Amino acid sequence: MKDGKKGKNNGKKSGKDGQSVAVQFGRQFFVALLLLFVTLSIYDIVVSEIKVIPEISVSQLVSDVKAGLITNISVEGDALTLTYKDGVTKISKKEVETSLSTTFVNYGVTEDNLKNVRIDILNPTGLYFWVVALSPFIFPLIFVFIIFWMISRQVKGSAMQAFSFGQSKARIIEPSDEKQKVLFKDVAGAKEAKEELIEIVDFLKNPKKFLDIGARIPKGVILTGAPGTGKTLLARAVAGEANVPFLYLSGSEFVEMFVGVGASRVRDLFKMAKKIAPSIIFIDEIDAVGRHRGGGMGGGNDEREQTLNQILVEMDGFEPSEKVIVIAATNRPDVLDIALLRPGRFDRRIVIDLPDLKEREAILQIHGVGKPFAEDVNLKVIAERTPGFSGADLANLMNEASILAAREDRTKVSQYDMIRSVEKVMLGPERKSHILSLDEKKITAYHEMGHALVASILSYSDPVHKVSIIARGRAAGYTLKLPLEEKKMKSKKNFLDDIAVSLGGYAAEKMIFGDMTTGASNDIAVATAVARDMVSRFGMSDKIGPVDFGADNGSISPMFPGMKNGLAYSEKFAAELDLEVSRIMNEALARANDVLSSHKSALDNMAVELTKIETLERKEFDDLLILNGIKPKKIEEAPIAGSVNTEV
């Protein structure tokens, strides 16, 4: 039944294509006729406006010659062109088989009458005569021929497009294309991912070594990771190292409104790859067609499902000797169909993490090639200030630094440009036009210093790296914190202190001014999200216990397989969850109030200083802490993660 429906759809599509071609031909034919009509009309108007030359008889010609009015006579066959002394031109005709001189003798014209008249005899060639005679007919025919030729070319192109509708749209990077070639040395970081992919390179270069020992080479590799971590770059590096053709396209390029087109393009893609094997097929954003089947409303004729089915069939049809590797990339591996990820299709799943400190420094060095740096540039310091940045973010950072230097007409990129570009990428550009009033500036200073002071007092919070009340993006001010040491996990105490720090600005506003502003809205949202994750995902609530109430645990819908119902817990548990989140938030607020109350004089002094100079770097902030009797936290040389509190 599915094949029958598919055939009907294809038949309808072919009929529509034929009908559209016929309609297009009719329209273009009508346009051609309209153009021809307009051209002939313009020609007729132009010809009609040409001045008519008067024609005189032979007797009048003779009289004018005797009167000495004519200065020149041009003879062209039987036609005579007469030029008078006053510049007037007239025409006349002589007798057919009689010469002009004989005619003049017969009419009594003497030699004295002709001594001031110049007579020119013109002998036109036969070609010129026929061109002049046939030009009113030839040129319209040539014009019509050109119009029909252009129409036939367009109709032919439309027909060819209709026939190529199901062909693959993959682009190919040839091994000889040095401009687009990428090697592993051009990709910084991702050490573990490179080690996994080196085996793919070895197989493409020397498959016999693996086949002789009985090893089955992976048919597919799927790269997962956050956006901008270098998935596409790594895939291109595999092709560059193996020196094989690289066919690449996006998953969305398979999908069209007609059922079966995506499957046809998949067949054509794999056919193309087998012809030029060894080769690599790269499908970016494969989740566009590789989602769980059964969740759509289109039934068996859902275009994405048909495309996914064809991908599964093509990957199953590979032979070990075909030397075609499929590499796919996605940042949503959770939505992919399980049949796509099983061994024999995508055998390997490689996770590409965000770069750590050393990898960030290496990435900055690669993107810094060709940029003139000043002597004060220290890429390690920039790497320390960019926790959580992806490779794409770091590339953007370097570009923004160059733009900032060029904007100020400098020939080298300085460290100051790099630091400003970090903040620009994180928070947005400085809003120089956003000038705060004196009261708003004071509120913002106390707000940000509330964050910074609570972070400096609590034991498990990250130390403060910078405090500023200069508006950037949507933030009127921000507090940058970096951790003491490199760590991959966060404890409950870390989370509780982070929530208290987030509420430090809110607590400072309420304590100093007895009122609250909208500036704490982003802080409250971030803190609430952390508290909810602690209770519903991380099992960090003594009352709720180690239970995961995440949204991904929704029950499967019996009506639409692949789709989930709402919450996976009862209303009773939802109420308890809300109460527990509220308790954590209120306790964190109380801790922030206690810290600020105990160090109110330090809060006042440091907020006044921040109001004056607007930005406090790490050393300046630590000096203020020491002046107010607070011991600053020691910041290690290699932090890898940090956070920013902002006032919106």
Image (cartoon, grey):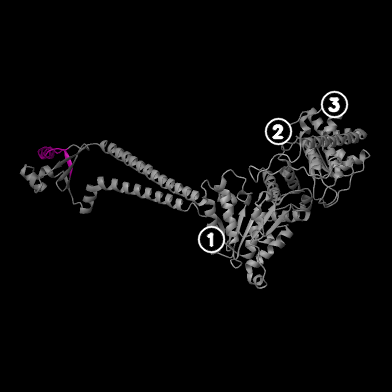
Residue 423 in the image: state x and y as whole percent.
74, 43
Residue 526 in the image: state x and y as whole percent.
78, 38
Mark 2 residue crowding within 10 angstroms, few (<14) / some (14–19) / many (20+): few
Residue 616 in the image: state x and y as whole percent.
82, 40
Asked if residue 67 is among those painted magenta in the image, a careful observer would answer yes
Q: Do labels 2 and 1 touch, CB within 8 Å?
A: no
From the image, tell me which residue sits under label 2.
433
Q: Residue 211 or 113: which is nearer the viewer?
A: 211
What label sits on residue 514 in the rendered view? 3
Q: Mark 2 to mark 1: distance in Å?
A: 58 Å
**For the residue marked with disc 1, what is the amino acid?**
Lys
Asked if residue 247 is among those painted magenta in the image, a careful observer would answer no
Disc with the residue nearer the chain's start (3 vs 2): 2
Disc with the residue nearer the chain's start (1 vs 3): 1
90 vs 430, left or right, is left
Q: Residue 414 or 151: which is nearer the viewer?
A: 151
Q: Residue 125 or 441: which is nearer the viewer?
A: 441
Disc with the residue nearer the chain's start (2 vs 1): 1
